[in-house]
Amino acid sequence: MRPGTVIVDVAIDQGGCIETADHTTSHSAPTYERHGVLHYAVSNIPGAVPRTSTYALNNATLPFALELADKGCARIIAGKAQLSLGINIINGKVVNRAVAEALSLDCNTI
């Protein structure tokens, strides 16, 4: 990234999603610089605005939940492969590798 870029790791409290974001920050000291890039890595960012973040999450996920309720899991998996990546357990079997590893369980395929 170019020097002066700002990057926000919104998943830092769940292990992070940015290679150079290696530690959490706080609201009192929210940023640090690495390789000329300003990193913002405050844990639980949505917790600072719980009502707003709840509405945002609901607005973003409700269409998928309604489609899942309408079509069922099997049709969702067959028609939208990207949504199948969000399935952790199906028919009582863990199908998400990260979940399986975290719980020391076998990982099955969908």
Image (tube, grey):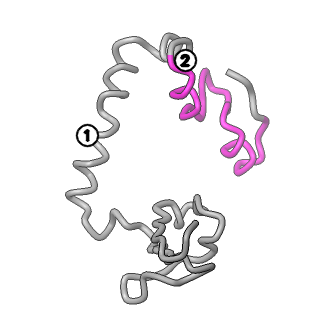
Residue 82 position (above or below residue 40): above
69 relative to 6 in the view: left or right: left
Residue 89 in percent (x, y) is at 60, 31
Residue 21 position (above or below residue 62): below
Residue type, mark 1 in image? Asn
- Number of callouts in the render? 2
Which of the two discs, 1 and 2, labels the residue nearer the N terminus?
1
Q: Residue at x 45, y 71 (%)?
A: 6
**Which region shows up in magenta?**
80-106
Residue 92 falls within the magenta-colored stretch: yes
Residue 10 in percent (x, y) is at 46, 61
The residue at which mark 1 appears reads as 59
Residue 47 falls within the magenta-colored stretch: no
Helix, strand or loop for disc 1? helix
Q: Which corner quadrant holds the N terminus?
A: bottom right
Q: Nearer the viewer, residue 54 or 93?
A: 54
The residue at which mark 2 appears reads as 77
Residue 29 position (above or below residue 37): below
Q: Residue at x 67, y 27 (%)?
A: 93
Q: Residue at x 71, y 48 (%)?
A: 103
Residue type, mark 2 in image? Ile
Q: Nearer the viewer, residue 13 or 4?
A: 4
Residue at mark 1 to residue at mark 2: CA–CA distance: 22 Å
Which quarter of the figure has residue 35?
bottom right
Residue 87 in percent (x, y) is at 56, 31
Residue 86 position (above or below residue 78): below
Q: Which corner quadrant holds the C terminus?
A: top right
10 Å crowding of disc 1: few (<14), some (14-19), many (20+): few
Task: Identify the disc placed on residue 39.
Answer: none
Residue lying furthest bottom: 28
103 relative to 24 in the view: left or right: right
Helix, strand or loop for disc 2? helix
